[in-house]
Image (cartoon, coloured by chain):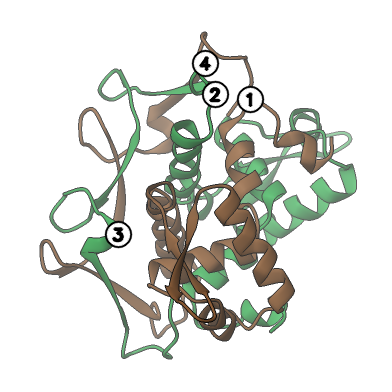
Chain colours: A green, B brown
Amino acid sequence: MRWEDLADQPCSMARALAVVGDRWTLMILRDAFLKVRRFDDFQKSLGLARRVLSERLALLVEEGVLEKRPYQERPVRYEYRLTDKGLDLYPTVLSLIHWADKHCAGPEGPPVLHHHKTCGCDFRSVLTCSECGKKVKPRQVEARANIAAPRQPA
Amino acid sequence: MRWEDLADQPCSMARALAVVGDRWTLMILRDAFLKVRRFDDFQKSLGLARRVLSERLALLVEEGVLEKRPYQERPVRYEYRLTDKGLDLYPTVLSLIHWADKHCAGPEGPPVLHHHKTCGCDFRSVLTCSECGKKVKPRQVEARANIAAPRQPA
């Protein structure tokens, strides 16, 4: 199977990866959550080729993850802002950062700390159940086909 | 900057993506969480080239995300199991699946439902704060450099 075909499969992971399944795309999203908004700032932060950055931003706009908004009139210049669909990727992005904080950081610890302004503490992300509020562990979860949808693992 | 150089940056996201920043790798992890363990079963499930699968599995073993365990003696055959480091990727994988369930599923709904055996309900994943237990939203979080570590956004 080619990657392009997989994206049409009735599998949420495949569909998600058709949008964000690229390392640069995930780095762009990291920057977007750090309030980077302008092409040149993404370029400076990530140091990737302008053509690649341009393609990745265009895909994220096309998929409704980012939106282009003019911030200057003559000439018109745009910035890229996370949409609600984009903001919903925060758990994925933060979970991945915290995973690497735990497993890939050197002896000096994680390079960045995350502060929860609501409670005033530095925190780590915890995946919990929408129904009972408890922490979810992989062995407590059973995946089963939704009989209303085409059958395929996801 | 080349991708290979970025992986050496003091940034947790870059370090994470050096391990899992590949679409096939994330599909392999999805399967691993669905208890797929053997090379031929991964291959059948994903339909990707054996050489690509072999490379991706080798990287995940090298990085300590999967471990090879013999399940047969003559000839020796191995299966691939998630390590504790691998199991810790569950929040990332499940958040991404649930994001696509919400934003990319067709009118028939998500292809797979996740059942929390602990409470007996189908659930959605919620990212919460390790300190106060409340749901974490991106605008409530401030990222700041850990002064003990080299400075770089992450």
Same chain under badges 1 and 4? The reply is no
Q: Nearer the viewer, mark 1 or mark 4?
A: 4
The C terminus of chain B sits in image quarter:
top right
Q: Real-space Cα distance between discs 2 and 3?
A: 27 Å
Q: Are marks 2 and 1 in contact (CB under 8 Å)?
A: yes
Q: Which residue is mark 4?
A: A108
Q: Amino acid at mark 4?
A: Glu
Q: Which mark is residue A106?
A: 2
Question: What residue is shown at x 39% (from left), y 66% (from top)?
Answer: B33
Report the disc number at residue A138: 3
- Chain under disc 4: A
Tell me residue B70's x, y (percent): 45, 69
Compared to B32, does A37 lie above or below?
Answer: above
The residue mark sitting in front, 2 or 1, is 2
**SS of the residue at dot 4?**
loop
**Number of residues whose C-alpha sits closer than 10 Å to that of mark 1, classed few (under 14), some (14–19) or many (20 or more):** many
Q: Please state the horizontal and vertical placement of residue B1, each as a whole percent of the image.
A: 84, 35
Amino acid type indicated by mark 1:
Pro
* CB-based contact (under 8 Å), mark 2 and mark 3: no
Cα distance in 3D space between marks 1 and 4: 10 Å
